[in-house]
Image (cartoon, helix red, strand yellow):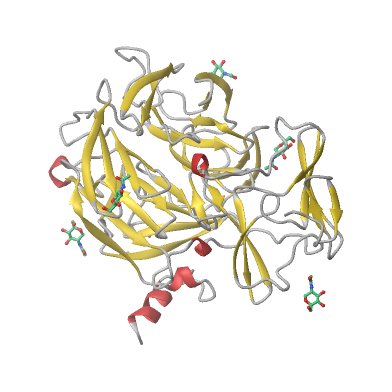
C-alpha cells in the first residue's frame, strides 16, 4: 500500500472525493527566520507578496515593538517600523488602501495606558494611533463586516470574552457595539463569503450545552447553526484562515489522550459544519506536543498557508520543555496545481439567462454584477469565484488585486437613477435605482450605446 493510501486510511475522515484531503500536506520551513523565537505575533497578507508580522513576545515574556515585512516572493524578512510600545496577541485588518490596523494586545485588564488601535501605513512606513479601544483587545479575533468593507469587528478576548467591538477604518472610531450570545476563551474566528461568521473556541463559562463551533449572523448576533460536539478542544491560541471554500484552524489543539493529533491542521467545511484533521508531514508539533500562539495567513496567490512562530510544549507542561519558534513555514494546499486564481472553488452559479459561457473561449472573465467576483469559462461551463477580502478582480491583469489598483465601475453609489454602460461587456448595461445595481442584457445581437443610452445594432454602436 502506498503511504498516500495509508495516510487516507489512517485518517478515516479523509474523503477520497475531496482532492485536498488526500494530498500529502507538508510543512516547508522557509529560509528566513524571525529575529528570535516569538509567539503571539499577528500577521496579515497584503494581497500581493508581503506578510506583515506585528508584535509578539519571546521566551522571557518580553513584548516586541517590531513590525516585520516578510516578502514571500524573495523569502526575505526585514524590520520596517516600530510600534510605540511592545504588544502581543493583537489582531490586524487592512483597509482598501492597504493600511493596516493593529488592535493592540497586552495581557491583563489593568493597562498602563488605554489600549489603542494603531495604524501602520506601508506606503509611508509610518505608525500612528487611530483610536482608543474601550478595553484591552488581548487574544481577540477580528472579522470584517460583510456589508461594509470599512468596518471590522473585534471579538472577545481578555478580559471580556463576550464583547464585540466595532471599528470603522474610514472614520477611525471604535465602540463596544454588542455582546456575543456565547463566549469563548481562547477563540478564533473567520467569515465565509456569504456573510456569516464562525467562531471556534473553548467556552469561557461552564456551558450547559457544549457548542464549540457556532455560525453567527453578526448583524443580528444570532446563532444560525452549531458545529460538531467532537470538535477538538482548543487548549491554546489557534489561528484560522479561509481559502474561499474551507477554513483551516492552525495550532491550539492536540491531545494524545483524546486522540487529537497535534501534527495536523483542521479543515472546517462551512457547508456541512463539520471538520477533518489533515496530517501534515514535518509539522512543528507532534502527538505529545502541540503548537500554539502561531499566526497564520492564507496567501491566495500561491495557494499556501504561512505559519509564523509560536511555541510548542509537552502535553504535561513544564517550562523546560517549551520551544519558542523563530521559523516560518508554509503548507501548500493544492500541491501540483497551477498557482492561479482559479484555485478558488465555486460558490454559486450565475443565472444562465443573463450570462453564459456559451461561445466564450476558456478563461477568466469579470463578474457582471460584482467587482470582487469573477467567472471562469471552461468548455462552456461557468463557475463563479470570489476574491479573498479585501481584493477585487482586476479585468486587465485577470487576477485578484488590491482595491486601489482595480478600476471597478460596477457601482450605483453616488449615481443618479438611470442607465450606464457596463465596463466590460457591451451587450450588458447597468441600471441604477436608489443606488442599487441592476444588470440588464440587450437583446441579441444588440449592444448598449453609451451615447443614446439604448440598445442598438452593433454597426451603429460605438463600444
Ligand atoms: C518582493 O520581492 C520581489 C522579488 O525580489 C520584488 O520584485 C518585490 O518588489 C518585493 N515586494 C515588495 C513589496 O517589496
Ligand atoms: C456587555 O456585557 C457587559 C457585562 O459583561 C455589560 O457591562 C455591557 O454593558 C454589555 N454591553 C453591551 C453593548 O451590551
Ligand atoms: C443577517 O440578518 C439580517 C437581518 O435579518 C439579514 O438582513 C441578513 O441577510 C442576514 N445575513 C445573512 C448572511 O444571512
Ligand atoms: C515530537 O517532537 C519533539 C519536539 O520536536 C521531538 O523531540 C520528538 O522526537 C517528536 N516525537 C516524535 C514521535 O516524532
Ligand atoms: C452561440 O453560437 C451559435 C452559433 O453561432 C448561435 O447559434 C448561438 O445563438 C450562440 N449562443 C449565444 C448564447 O450567443
Q: Residue furthest bottom?
A: 1
The answer to whether residue 211 of the structure is visible from this angle is: yes
Q: Is residue 118 left or right of residue 387?
A: left
Residue drawn at x 74%, y 47% as measured from the top left? 421
Give the total number of marks visible in the rendering.
0
User: Residue 220 or 422: which is nearer the viewer?
Assistant: 422
The answer to whether residue 271 of the structure is visible from this angle is: no
User: Residue 111 or 80: which is nearer the viewer?
Assistant: 80
* Residue 343 image offset from top left, x and y in percent: 50, 64
User: Residue 135 or 340: which is nearer the viewer?
Assistant: 340
> Could you say which quadrant of the image residue 188 lies in?
top left
Quadrant of the drawing holding the C terminus: bottom right
* Residue 134 image offset from top left, x and y in percent: 46, 16
* Residue 178 image offset from top left, x and y in percent: 59, 23
Decide: is 80 above or below 231. Answer: above
Quadrant of the drawing holding the N terminus: bottom left
Decide: is 373 above or below 108. Answer: below
Residue drawn at x 71%, y 56% as measured from the top left? 425
Q: Residue furthest left?
A: 320
Q: Is residue 39 left or right of residue 93?
A: left
Q: Quadrant of ligand 2?
A: top right
Amino acid at each position: 500500500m502506498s503511504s498516500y493510501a495509508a495516510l487516507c486510511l489512517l485518517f478515516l475522515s479523509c474523503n477520497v472525493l475531496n482532492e485536498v484531503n488526500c494530498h500529502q500536506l507538508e510543512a516547508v520551513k522557509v529560509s528566513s527566520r524571525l529575529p528570535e523565537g516569538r509567539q503571539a505575533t499577528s500577521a496579515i497578507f497584503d494581497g500581493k507578496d508581503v506578510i506583515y508580522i506585528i508584535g509578539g513576545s519571546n521566551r522571557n515574556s518580553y513584548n516586541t515593538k517590531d513590525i516585520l515585512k516578510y516578502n514571500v516572493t524573495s523569502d526575505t524578512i526585514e524590520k520596517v517600523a516600530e510600534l510605540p510600545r511592545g504588544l502581543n496577541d493583537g489582531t490586524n485588518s487592512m483597509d482598501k488602501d492597504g493600511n493596516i490596523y493593529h488592535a493592540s494586545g497586552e495581557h491583563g485588564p489593568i493597562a498602563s495606558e488605554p489600549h489603542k488601535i494603531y495604524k501602520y501605513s506601508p506606503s509611508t512606513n509610518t505608525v500612528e494611533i487611530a483610536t482608543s479601544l474601550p478595553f484591552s483587545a488581548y487574544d481577540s479575533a477580528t472579522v470584517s463586516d460583510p456589508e461594509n468593507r470599512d468596518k471590522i469587528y473585534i471579538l472577545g478576548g481578555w478580559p471580556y470574552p463576550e464583547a464585540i467591538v466595532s471599528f470603522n477604518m474610514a472614520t477611525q472610531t471604535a465602540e463596544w457595539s454588542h455582546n456575543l450570545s456565547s463566549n469563548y476563551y481562547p477563540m478564533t474566528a473567520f467569515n465565509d463569503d456569504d456573510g456569516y461568521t464562525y467562531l471556534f473556541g473553548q467556552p469561557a463559562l461552564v456551558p450547559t450545552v457544549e457548542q464549540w463551533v457556532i455560525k453567527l449572523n453578526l448583524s443580528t448576533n444570532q446563532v444560525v447553526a452549531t458545529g460538531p460536539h467532537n470538535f477538538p478542544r482548543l487548549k491554546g491560541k489557534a489561528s484560522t484562515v479561509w481559502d474561499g471554500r474551507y477554513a483551516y484552524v492552525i495550532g491550539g489543539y492536540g491531545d494524545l489522550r483524546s486522540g487529537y493529533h497535534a501534527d495536523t491542521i483542521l479543515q472546517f467545511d462551512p457547508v456541512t459544519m463539520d471538520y477533518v484533521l489533515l496530517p501534515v508531514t514535518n509539522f512543528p508539533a507532534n502527538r505529545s506536543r502541540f503548537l500554539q500562539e502561531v499566526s497564520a495567513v492564507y496567501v491566495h496567490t500561491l495557494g499556501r498557508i504561512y505559519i509564523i512562530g509560536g511555541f510548542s510544549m509537552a502535553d504535561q507542561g513544564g517550562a523546560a520543555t517549551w520551544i519558542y519558534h523563530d521559523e516560518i513555514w508554509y503548507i501548500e494546499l493544492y500541491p501540483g496545481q497551477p498557482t492561479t486564481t482559479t484555485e478558488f472553488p465555486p460558490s454559486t452559479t450565475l443565472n444562465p439567462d443573463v450570462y453564459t459561457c456559451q461561445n466564450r473561449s476558456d478563461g477568466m472573465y469579470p463578474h457582471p454584477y460584482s467587482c470582487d467576483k469573477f467567472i471562469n469559462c471552461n468548455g462552456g461551463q461557468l463557475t463563479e469565484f470570489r476574491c479573498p477580502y479585501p481584493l477585487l478582480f482586476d479585468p486587465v491583469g485577470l487576477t485578484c488585486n488590491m482595491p486601489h489598483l482595480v478600476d471597478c465601475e460596477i457601482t450605483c453609489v453616488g449615481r443618479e437613477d438611470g442607465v450606464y454602460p457596463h465596463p466590460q461587456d457591451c451587450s450588458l448595461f447597468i441600471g441604477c435605482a436608489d443606488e442599487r445595481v441592476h444588470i440588464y442584457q440587450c437583446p441579441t445581437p444588440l449592444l448598449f450605446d453609451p451615447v443614446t443610452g439604448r440598445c442598438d445594432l452593433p454597426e451603429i454602436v460605438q463600444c
